[in-house]
């Protein structure tokens, strides 16, 4: 994404609590943009994939928001696309 270092976004939940998240990647799927996010305050470990959050960019009143994916099939498809893309990129680096 950003060749100069990681990008971050601050998310606010329904209770007003803020979370700083690192943007790992974005992907397009069926005309929408999806973001793979990881908590900025966590150290990577063997279970980092469990901490990845995938949110969908939704436009309302001219503003873009990141929202939860409500459809399980859509979420599974997008998650698999992120995994496939990551595996492809890892394979390229090994060559």
Image (spheres, rainbow, N blue to C red):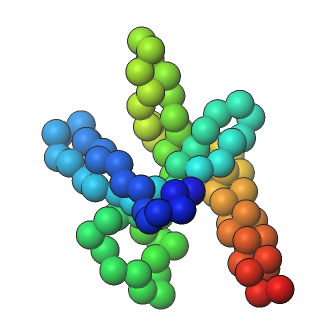
Confirm whether residue 56 shows in the render. Answer: yes
Image quadrant in which you'd find residue 51: bottom left
Q: Would residue 31 be found to the left or right of residue 18 on screen?
A: right
Q: Residue furthest top?
A: 61
Residue in the picture at 65% in, 48% down: 27
Q: Nearer the viewer, residue 5 or 91?
A: 5
Which part of the image, by quadrant, shows the C terminus?
bottom right
Q: Residue furthest left?
A: 16
Residue in the picture at 77% in, 87% down: 94
Q: Nearer the viewer, residue 88 or 66?
A: 88
Q: Residue furthest front?
A: 4
Residue in the picture at 17% in, 40% down: 15
Q: Would residue 26 be found to the left or right of residue 22 on screen?
A: right
Q: Would residue 56 be found to the left or right of residue 81 on screen?
A: left
Q: Nearer the viewer, residue 92 or 87?
A: 92
16 versus 39 height, above or below: above
Q: Position of residue 1 (x, y in %)?
A: 56, 56
18 versus 39 height, above or below: above
Q: Position of residue 14 (x, y in %)?
A: 24, 37
């Amino acid at each position: 994404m950003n060749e100069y270092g990681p990008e971050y976004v601050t998310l606010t939940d329904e209770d007003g609590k803020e979370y700083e998240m690192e943007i790992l990647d974005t992907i397009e799927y069926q005309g929408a943009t999806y973001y793979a996010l990881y908590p900025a305050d966590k150290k990577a470990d063997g279970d980092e994939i469990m901490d990845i959050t995938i949110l969908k960019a939704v436009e309302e009143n001219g503003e873009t928001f990141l929202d939860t994916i409500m459809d399980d099939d859509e979420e599974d498809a997008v998650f698999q696309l992120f995994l496939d893309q990551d595996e492809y990129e890892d394979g390229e680096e090994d060559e």
